[in-house]
Image (cartoon, grey):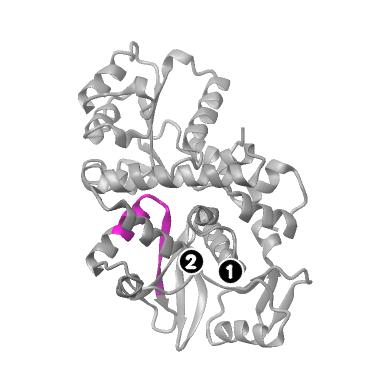
């Protein structure tokens, strides 16, 4: 079992606080396992088993026709005034679940934890009903550092390639053959498409939905507009409207398959409404549709860096500086940090191109070029070129 220490510590911090703990993330990223680890922690500090109520709502044995049945089922188990810890896994499977959650929240000796595999969980009535009363913990598949720690090996290019080839989903660590991993990813992808997208959004044409997803996986890290996607698919013989593309993309983002990244005008200090990019929550899911040939290692690396930035709590944008682009503008309470990502900058022209985007920024926030090159840290008038593996390992 992988501890997922970062997320475990967050749950510990929020324990017994008067807030609902909502753990969100793509299917099979480890939410249920996190709850199990946290429950073990609670037992280790003296919480009795009969004061821990854990229900996996994807288990057919735990089907509830409505929120009232779920609420009453839990309430019957609360028999004294000591603190109870209630864990509801994949809560979105219960109709009007937000009413049951709200009912549990107002019981003084109940600490509520829920998970969901769709951003719908924090939209609509739940957001309205529970505004200011929940904390969201966004969970992702394994980071590169977690992957390396699991295997207890040195972090190098070989294990990085393993990481990008064998999936960051925790269960994939148990699979030895590449073909097994591909089959697992294919099954997982189809479950997400059917359960978290098609059924929830009432999309009948799953074939076209998969076509849009396939297009997005083949264009990771490329600037895209909804119109461009619609025009490209239509010209390829798959007619689709702009409205339908927009609906499908929103659904794929809501199900955490993709992450939408807006653009930011660095000079004008304003957010732009067009030219966004999309990054996959797990880059290896593309193998389920595209195979393993002709992969752009640069775009994959860019995707890995993006995921690491959001894991570290940054708000991330695509930077625009005049006619040039900065791969990532990362913002936190300390200000901005700027990143260029390239698999290698050993070619002089490549290094000059990556430097040029950052040299045009006339402020003193940190600026980095991240590459796979195994070189000493280099400084180009304040722009640091560093090895991305060391950066991913937080060295």
Number of other residues with Cα within 10 Å of mark 1, as a class: few under 14, some 14 to 19, many 20 or more: few
Residue furthest front as drawn: 237
Q: Is residue 7 visible?
A: yes
Q: Residues within 10 Å of mark 2 (few under 14, many from 20)?
A: many
Question: Which is more toward the observer, 61 or 188?
Answer: 188
Q: Residue at x 27, y 31 (%)?
A: 94
Instruction: Indicate which disc, 2 or 1, sits on the residue closer to the N terminus.
Output: 2
- Secondary structure beneath label 1: loop
**Residue 223 percent location from the top left of the image:** 43, 74
Q: Report the residue marked by disc 2.
A: 220
Location of residue 317 in the rendering, given as x and y in whole percent from the top left corner: 44, 69
**Magenta highlight range:** 248-263
Q: Is residue 109 visible?
A: no
Along the line of sight, the residue nearer the viewer: 351 or 223 = 223
Residue contact at pointers 2 and 1, CB within 8 angstroms: yes
43, above or below 147, in the image: above
Q: Residue at x 58, y 48 (%)?
A: 168
Residue 302, x across and y down, in percent: 56, 67
Q: Which residue is mark 1?
A: 296
């Amino acid at each position: 079992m992988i501890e997922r220490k970062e997320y475990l510590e967050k749950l510990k911090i929020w324990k017994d606080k008067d807030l609902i703990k909502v753990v969100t993330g793509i299917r099979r990223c480890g939410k249920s396992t996190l709850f199990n680890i946290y429950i073990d922690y609670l037992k280790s500090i003296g919480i009795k088993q009969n004061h821990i109520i854990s229900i996996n709502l994807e288990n057919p044995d735990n089907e509830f026709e409505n929120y009232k049945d779920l609420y009453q089922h839990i309430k019957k188990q609360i028999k004294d005034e000591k603190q109870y810890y209630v864990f509801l896994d994949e809560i979105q499977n219960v109709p009007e679940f937000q009413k049951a959650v709200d009912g549990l929240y107002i019981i003084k000796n109940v600490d509520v934890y829920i998970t969901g595999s769709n951003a719908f969980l924090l939209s609509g009535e739940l957001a309205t009903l529970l505004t200011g009363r929940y904390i969201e913990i966004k969970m992702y598949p394994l980071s590169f550092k977690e992957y390396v720690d699991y295997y207890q090996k040195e972090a190098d290019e070989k294990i990085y390639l393993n990481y990008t080839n064998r999936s960051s989903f925790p269960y994939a660590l148990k699979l030895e053959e590449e073909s097994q991993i591909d089959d697992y990813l294919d099954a997982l992808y189809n479950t997400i498409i059917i359960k978290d997208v098609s059924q929830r959004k009432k999309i009948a044409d799953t074939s076209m939905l998969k076509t849009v997803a396939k297009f997005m996986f083949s264009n990771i890290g490329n600037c895209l507009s909804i119109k461009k996607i619609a025009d490209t698919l239509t010209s390829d013989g798959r007619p689709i409207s702009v409205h339908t593309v927009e609906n499908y993309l929103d659904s794929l983002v809501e199900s955490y398959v993709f992450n939408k990244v807006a653009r930011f005008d660095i000079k004008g200090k304003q957010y732009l409404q067009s030219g966004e990019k999309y990054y996959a929550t797990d880059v290896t899911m593309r193998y389920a549709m595209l195979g393993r040939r002709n992969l752009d290692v640069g775009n994959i690396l860019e995707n890995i860096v993006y995921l690491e930035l959001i894991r570290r709590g940054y708000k991330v944008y695509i930077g625009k500086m005049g006619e040039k682009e900065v791969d990532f503008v990362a913002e936190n309470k300390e200000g901005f940090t700027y990143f260029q990502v390239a698999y290698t900058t050993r070619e002089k022209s490549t290094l000059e191109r990556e430097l040029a985007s950052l040299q045009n920024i006339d402020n003193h926030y940190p600026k980095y070029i991240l590459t796979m090159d195994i070189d000493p840290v280099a400084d180009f008038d304040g722009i640091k070129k560093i090895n991305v593996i060391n950066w991913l390992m937080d060295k």
